[in-house]
Image (cartoon, rainbow, N blue to C red):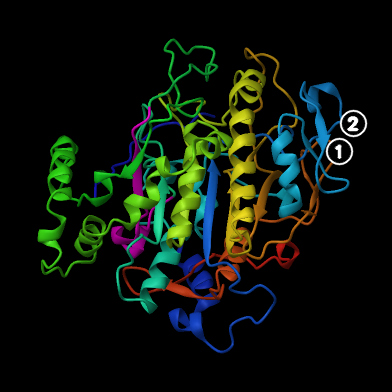
Amino acid sequence: MLSINGTRRTLCDGMSRRELLRLGSVGALGLSDLFASSAPATAQFGKAKSCILIFLYGSPSQHETFDPKPDAPVEVRGEIGSIPSSVPGMRICERLPRVSQVMKHTTVVRSMTHRYPEHGVAYAVSGIPTYTPELETRPRDSRHWPYIGSVVDYLDRRTQQSIPAVPRNIGLPWMVNSKTDMLVNAGPFAAFLGQAYDPLWTNFSGTGTRIVPHYTNGQVKDFHDPYGGTTAGGRFSMSPDSQLRDDISIERLNLRQSLLSQFEQSRRQIDAAPVHDLQRKRAYSLLTSNAVHRALDIGREPLPLREKYGLTLFGQSCLAARRLVEAGSKFVTVFWDGFGQFGGCGWDTHNNHFPRMKEYLLPGFDLAYSALIDDLHARGILDETAVLCISEHGRTPQIDQKPKGAGRHHWSRVYSAVFAGGGFAKGRVVGASDKIGGDVKETPISPKDILATTFHLLGIDVHTTVPDTLGRPYPIAGDGEVRHELIG
């Protein structure tokens, strides 16, 4: 695998021995708990056969998505209104008309909360109990805990020794943050489980077709951002980067891309080659099986369906995710990632908040998310596919009018997330924020609770532990608890 070295830098805005022992004791029975007869027998345990995790990097405003405040002062509610949804009494942002129609399939949580208003992807997607910006910039730091998709992959391999034709743990559209001017951030990596359990990342060949509103006031370069629009000829492929080992330098990436093409021509010859290393087995499996390549070939879908998802990178990634779970992948992650510039990228709307929300972010999300839920439902697989839509945090209730286009800044005291399928309840709102969307009013829910609930729906006992490099047990969801309010 490619070695990713962190740097000391400032983002846009160690666990102690005692903590380790306390958390380790939560799941002291270890991996054997996974299939113990004492596993929870509550409703929907194991209902989900697969999971699609959608991560909106940079963090959307709860006010302009799933928790609008139409009765709040204008400096809070902003210039975007709200509309009713397919769930009686549930209003969402008026710029999400298609999403409003699929809310009957979802559970909206309006009381997500934690204490770290930073771009803590690693905190949101792993059981790690604390967070620092330093850790976020060091994806291979030994203090990290494994990504939820990596845990699912690891546990599944304990019971199924064969390498599946379609990888269990895949990340779209590319290694997170790798297309910005900064180094890769932490989060979707296997940590102490070993790099063999990192997500396998794809690449995307389509180019951007439009320049999106600027990230920051000082931005001097325009980017043809594929999240704003891309060509119909764009295709996904398995990234050569996903198969690089630690001893492969960045300078050899282009050589490996050339070698991959040669390997593709020699699949039949290497099918019988002896392999012993898990990473090599996985690489050989990818080369000798057409299943993952077929699943990633979104060109097999009718153009009208592709257009329903939206001819954007996010839309086509959601379509590819649906194809992957249909083909047998267990855990697929779709990032709405940054492109070109890191600071203020994605949903990190410190500047140009309203232009970016109106012209770029909300339209793309409205098409893709609604199409994914509709498509899964029409194919009869929504009930067995958990779909999580989460982010690092929310954004400030008070609008900052000083930046161009206004801004909302980091806010983790309360924010929203939305869940569908796989045993999550239908047409439900869980929790509430106060009248300005600034604090939890009732039913606080943490990112760790979301991890625990997702494991539960995937049929994994939340008290299961995984060993670190010294064999010490770590609870897979940290101190998270299964939240039955979210389960149908």
Q: Position of residue 9 (x, y in %)?
A: 39, 32
In terms of sequence position, does the residue under pointer 2 or pointer 1 come before the other? Answer: 2
Q: Position of residue 31 (x, y in %)?
A: 44, 79
Instruction: Check if mark 2's residue and mark 1's residue have beta carbons within 8 Å.
Output: yes
State whether residue 53 appears in this view: yes
Depth check: give the residue in front, 132 or 108.
108
Looking at the rendering, the stretch of residues picked out in magenta corresponds to 188-206
Q: Secondary structure at mark 2?
A: loop
Left or right: where does residue 391 sit relative to residue 105? left
Name the residue beneath numbered marker 2.
Answer: 71
Q: Residues within 10 Å of mark 1 (few under 14, many from 20)?
A: some
State whether residue 140 appears in this view: no
Q: Position of residue 198 (x, y in %)?
A: 35, 56
Q: Amino acid at mark 2?
A: Asp
Disc assigned to residue 65: none
Q: Is residue 465 above or below residue 35?
A: above
Name the residue beneath numbered marker 1.
Answer: 435
| Identity of the residue drawn at 87% across and 30% down | 72
